[in-house]
Image (tube, rainbow, N blue to C red):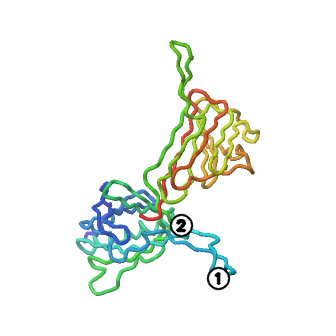
Amino acid sequence: MPLITAPVLTPPQPETPPPVDLPEIGYASITYVDPAGTRWPMTDLAADWYALAEGVSGLGAAPYTLTSDPHPRGGARLRHVQPQPRTIVWPVLVKGADHLAFTANWRALARAFTRTLRDGPGLLEVARPDGTRRTIAVHYQDGWDGRGRVATGITWDSAVVTLWCEDPYWVDAETVMVHREQGSGEDFLQPYPSVSSSQVLGATTVTNPGDVVVWPAWTITGPASLVTFTRTDTGESFVLDPNDPSIGHGSLLPGQQVTVRTDPPQVRYQNGDNWVGALNWPDATLWGLDPGDTPVTFQLDGSGPGSAVDLTFNPRYETA
């Protein structure tokens, strides 16, 4: 007799699944993105799987541990606040037109979640009706098990999944980019008195619209012989010297690029070479951006036409 096999599951790929009302965050569309990049819509109630609003938790403010010292006159004084990993509880209903279809859906979703333990984190993405999106990296912890009740496990079942998040903050899917570039020089008297623009050198203000500190990446485009970034409200700074003997390069030529990442600390030349030795250790402080406005100064010695600084970061938030 012919062999009957279960169908191969390919999840639908809608751009944004329909929004539902979820505890702690209100109306939102939820998508799970597994480590392979496959998108699993979780709020499309017409699909064969979707999140159950009742029982969802862990989408609110990040958890914290407070360290305090006793005060001699009573009470205590707060000494340190430490953000803790977040745990998200995520009930999911899975169904199918028949037992084979249900089994294929159940197995495929189990694989999509549990592969985060082998292939790196997945992403939980929350999209609002206004088009904004926030994501959080998740690892499967436990819970992919059926209810074990009469009639479940045939054409439908549900699981209460626990997802563990090493970083408790939600990250804006849209990257904030700040670009400053040296203008081309002009002869002051030809053809008439003129002044060329220059945005690389001097002070500027960078705005972090998020709830918590972010750690940006800086890309420097030559020409430049020495680069200094200073946070002028605190005095923190770091200096990149492409002429440092440890890297054996010399001043950045026009078009050459170096990227400095602040968390974790990393300096890479455009070909991937490690330039971390070009920073002014031990005085270098790879500072972050607090919520709100931060005054900063870019200084590129040896700059010229084409010299540029690009700052990028994704705002981070307490809640989804």
Tell whether 270 sits left or right of 52: right
Locate residue 251, reporting x and y percent.
68, 32
* Residue hosting label 2: 166
Give the answer, above or below, for where 220 lies relative to 143.
above
| Farthest front residue in view | 73
Q: Secondary structure under badge 1?
A: loop
* Residue hosting label 1: 74
Q: Amino acid at mark 1?
A: Gly
Locate residue 287, reporting x and y percent.
62, 52
Screen quadrant of the N terminus:
bottom left
The label on residue 290 is: none
Locate residue 45, reporting x and y percent.
26, 67
Q: Amino acid at mark 2?
A: Glu
Q: Secondary structure under badge 2?
A: loop
Locate residue 71, reporting x and y percent.
67, 79
Earlier-in-chain disc, 1 versus 2: 1
Screen quadrant of the C terminus:
bottom left
Look at 47% across and 58% down and name the residue there: 171
Residue 97 seen from this side: yes
Camera-side mark, 1 or 2 = 1
Q: How much space separates mark 1 and mark 2, taking CA atoms? A: 35 Å
